[in-house]
Image: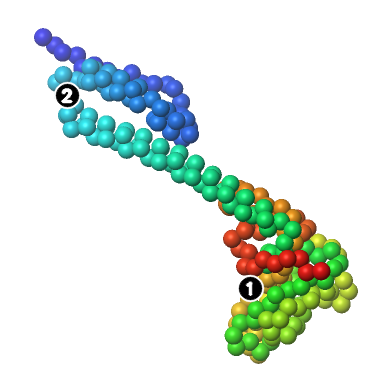
């Protein structure tokens, strides 16, 4: 007697997305068992599948299902933490936060918080506009005392209102030994949650991650 091996039908259904697949795996375990039963019924009698292979398939599916459920649990926990963080950040609105975010200049002097590197003999602030063009370089005292930046350009005239990046260059003689964005205080007007974490919106629409804020204070009159 001739035994004809069973053939396996090929599905033409397009593969599901990762989200769809995760939902199906976590909610349709019985479908997998039915598929496994069909596989057993249609295996080649002359070359049957080893029982250990079935065990591996079951273990693999169970592992994936557990991972999906774990991911869903973690996503829920992260969402809860973000909501908790937003509640905490709400109390920051109306206060002044210190960070090294870009500076919004509207004609009013900005109080900078310089921190020159150890060994500096000279401190310079380099100001760039929103397009990255250097518009000013200004020597400031080699001190951690607050410094009032008046917003003057290279010609001494006031810069137009806009967003500027201010970098503090710590120098020893003519050598730059450290260069980093300078910190300053700005009023917090809004707190926003997002995938990257809670963001604070400062005056002028400047955004900064809450975890990059180094100090908080009541507005200075």
Q: How many angstroms separate mark 1 from mark 2 (CA)?
A: 68 Å
The outermost residue toward the right is 157
Observer-nearest of 179 and 68: 68
The residue positioned 76% from the left and 73% from the top of the image is 111
Work out which quarter of the rendered image holds the N terminus and state it: top left
Q: Is residue 153 above or below residue 122?
A: above
Q: Position of residue 98 (x, y in %)?
A: 68, 67
Q: Quadrant of the C terminus?
A: bottom right
- Where disc 1 sits, the SS reads strand
Residue 177, by quadrant, is bottom right
- Left or right relative to 132: residue 12: left
Q: Left or right: where does residue 49 sit relative to residue 118?
A: left
Residue at 15% across, 13% down: 3
Q: Position of residue 25 (x, y in %)?
A: 39, 30
Q: Nearer the viewer, mark 1 or mark 2?
A: 1
Query: Residue at 22% across / 21% down in the picture?
Result: 40
Please give the label number shown on residue 31.
none
* Residue density around tag 2, few if under 14, some if 14–19, many if 20 or more, within 10 Å: few
Q: Earlier in the sequence, mark 1 or mark 2?
A: 2
Pointer 1: what residue?
A: 180
Q: With 198 as the anchor, is 74 left or right in this view?
A: left
Name the residue rendered at 33%, 18% in the picture.
9
Residue bearing mark 2:
48
Image height check: is 44 above or below 185?
Answer: above
């Amino acid at each position: 007697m001739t035994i004809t091996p069973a053939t396996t039908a090929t599905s033409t259904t397009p593969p599901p997305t990762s989200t769809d697949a995760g939902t199906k795996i976590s909610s349709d375990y019985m479908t997998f068992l039915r598929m496994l039963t069909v596989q057993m019924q249609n295996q080649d009698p002359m070359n049957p599948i080893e029982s250990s292979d079935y065990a591996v398939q079951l273990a693999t599916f169970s592992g994936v299902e557990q991972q999906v459920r774990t991911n869903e649990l973690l996503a829920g926990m992260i969402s809860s933490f973000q909501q908790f963080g937003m509640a905490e950040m709400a109390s920051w609105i109306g206060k002044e936060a210190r960070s090294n975010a870009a500076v919004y200049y509207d004609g009013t002097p900005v109080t900078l918080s310089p921190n020159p590197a150890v060994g500096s003999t000279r401190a310079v602030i380099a100001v760039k506009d929103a397009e990255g063009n250097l518009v000013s370089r200004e020597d400031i005292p080699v001190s951690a005392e607050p410094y009032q930046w008046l917003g003057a350009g290279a010609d001494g005239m006031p810069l137009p209102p806009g967003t500027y990046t201010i970098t503090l260059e710590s120098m020893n003689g003519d050598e730059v030994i450290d260069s980093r964005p300078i910190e300053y205080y700005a009023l917090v007007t809004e707190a926003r949650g997002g995938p990257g974490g809670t963001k604070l919106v400062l005056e002028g629409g400047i955004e900064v991650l809450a975890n990059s804020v180094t100090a908080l204070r009541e507005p200075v009159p």
